[in-house]
Amino acid sequence: MSVKLITYDLNAKGQKHTEVLAKIKSFGAWAKLSESRYAISTTLPVDKICQKFANLIDNNDTFLVIPLIGSHYGMALDDVYSWLNNNLN
């Protein structure tokens, strides 16, 4: 398993925020980093992850999947920091 960062902005009213969030949570192992930034743990490569969201993202939206590796530093809720410590090792 590896950790990927999903970051997105759905730029028009009526977007599918609920569906995007449900799809993120369907990976099972996830942590909310900020309003529209999540870390997930999965064996899927970034292109396959993006394909899973293709029907939920419009041309005017921003959606990126970025592999996360190595150490991290910052301030976050204890459960988020713990999740990162457990999954980025």
Image (cartoon, rainbow, N blue to C red):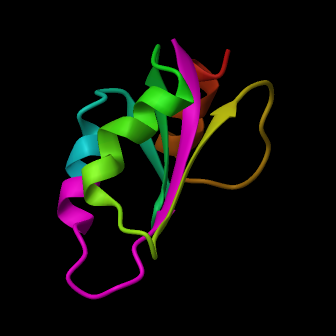
Residue situated in front as seen by the camera: 68 or 13? 13
Quarter in which the C terminus is drawn? top right
Q: 79 or 5: which is nearer to us?
A: 5
Give the camera-side residue of 6 and 86.
6
- Residue at image point 77% right, 37% down: 72
Q: Which residues are magenta?
A: 1-20
Residue 5 falls within the magenta-colored stretch: yes
Residue at image location 44% in from the left, 42% down from the top: 31
- In the picture, measured across the screen, residue 3 lies left or right of residue 44, that is right
Residue 60 in percent (x, y) is at 46, 76
Asked whether, in this view, residue 62 is left or right of residue 52, the answer is right
Which quadrant of the figure has residue 87? top right
Measuring from the top left, give residue 61's x and y in whole percent: 45, 71
Determine which quarter of the picture holds residue 82: top right
Q: Horizontal and vertical percent for residue 37?
A: 51, 56
Residue sitting at 65 percent across and 22 percent down? Answer: 88
Q: Is residue 14 visible?
A: yes
| Res 24 seen here | no
Q: Quadrant of residue 35?
A: bottom left
